[in-house]
Image (cartoon, rainbow, N blue to C red):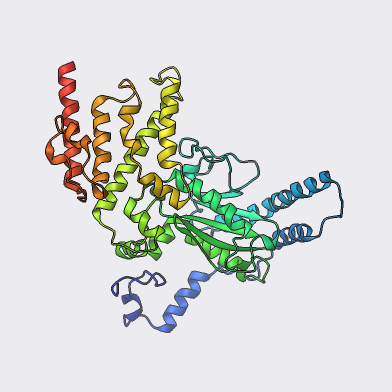
Amino acid sequence: MSNNISPGGLLTAPANFSSGQYTSTTMCSVVREELAGKVLKNDPSNEELFDDLESVVAAAARPPVRKSDHTAQLDARAKGDGWKVEMYPPLQRLCGYIFNYSHASEPKATRNITIAANRRLKGEVYTTGFPSVSPDGTGSCVPECDSWIDVDWLIAIKAREDQGVVATDTTISEVVFHAADYARLHLSCRSFQLFSVALLVFAHKFMVGIFDRDGVSLFPVFDFCDGGIGSKRLSEWFVGLSALASRMLISDATLLLYLCATRLGTVQFMAREILESIVNNHPIQHTDSHDLESFAWVFAYTVLRRFLREDEDEANTMFFKDDWITVRKLHDGSFGALELRNVLRQRKSLHTFKIAKSVPERVIPGVIGEFMTVLGALPRANYEDDSPVSSVLSTTLPPTVFLRSRTKMTHLHLIRLIDATIQAIVNETQVDG
């Protein structure tokens, strides 16, 4: 790692500073010319934004008027959500100002932020079974972000400081678990994304949270109204989210791989042995067999989602209602769990790969059904004794596809299975033709 460029280093040629023709005097003159007309001191143009934000926060912090009836309590609870909505306009203007700030000679930023109430982000295809919720704000490179798949990062907002700052390290604040609720939807739409980034705002304070499949990492808390330090941190964070800045700060691919080396992907697709190591807190070596097993689960998920979407076009669907219910049960039984131990329990069941036995051949072709069955037998062989399924299918697929008991699957086994399946499809096409 010693040869990697420092993420904080300037990505300019060092010869520019060591050459004899450049002296401190000439460099200062160049910098002075560069900065001409670009220095702004004590910019007062956005002071009213902080005043508006502070007034909402102060109002939300006041104790409610004492009333004993149940209706008053419901009104107070509803107003609690209303306070954060009143924070939306000043936060939208503040974030928009930072996002879109540029000098006349510079191109406009391509980042877009939307903070608004009653948004409904599309994504049912990717988030079946999840509640329909939307974050308080989103950042995206897409001008009109209306789908989870277009969301780059999230904003979660709470009106009171005690909803973000907690008394103990073991207590989870409201803003954190609400952001986690949004993050799981975000990651559900992007199955191969490593983490979800969220800006957590509570009263006039904020922090950044990075959510992955194993938890959340929280950055220090800053204050919008602390004389400029908090706003500076917010600006730095916004800038750091742009793809251009990411390429400038992490220009070495090996450094990026090093930073992401411990990320193993989506929990619902992880190999059984990896899940067991996490649950038991017993680290193991990550091998090719784990990646291949994850591929099997991703493929099964893709097939099931394809069948579930088929029902959306009723005119062309091959499904009967009972078929759809069967596939939905297989989907939820293999990919519906959120708690880690429940996901591990689902990994030990291979019912998803037996879909050919659950639905008629008009729904899933025979060759694909055989492929799914053998694909499920490969990860099973990683952990269990031989199954009679292998001997039955060996009449239609090459013996080299199958694994002996408790043998780790390899790329060669998977490639041979894919090749054999493709050849079987070709043979069927020739016969039908």
Give residue 134's quadrant in the image: top right
Residue 397 pos. (x, y %): 15, 33
Q: Position of residue 350 (x, y in %)?
A: 33, 40
Q: Position of residue 227 (x, y in %)?
A: 67, 71
Q: Quadrant location of the N terminus?
A: bottom left
Q: Residue at x 12, y 41 (%)?
A: 400
| Residue closest to the eye, 215 or 146 | 215
In this orientation, which residue lies closer to the viewer: 427 or 22?
Answer: 427
Whether residue 154 sits left or right of residue 314 in the image: it is right
Q: Residue furthest left?
A: 399
Q: Position of residue 300 (x, y in %)?
A: 33, 38
Q: Quadrant of residue 4?
A: bottom left
Along the line of sight, which residue is nearer the eye, 40 or 327?
327
- Camera-nearest residue between 194 and 37: 194
In the displayed structure, 134 sits above or below 33; it is above
Viewport quadrant of the C terminus? top left
- Give the residue at x 49% y 37%: 128
Residue at 36%, 78% in the rendered image:
17
- Judged left or right of residue 118, residue 348 is left
In the rendered structure, the answer to whether residue 197 lies left or right of residue 84 reads left
Q: How many marks?
A: 0
The reply to whether residue 15 is visible in this rendering is: yes
- Which residue is found at the position 46% from the left and 41% from the top? 336
Camera sees residue 45: no
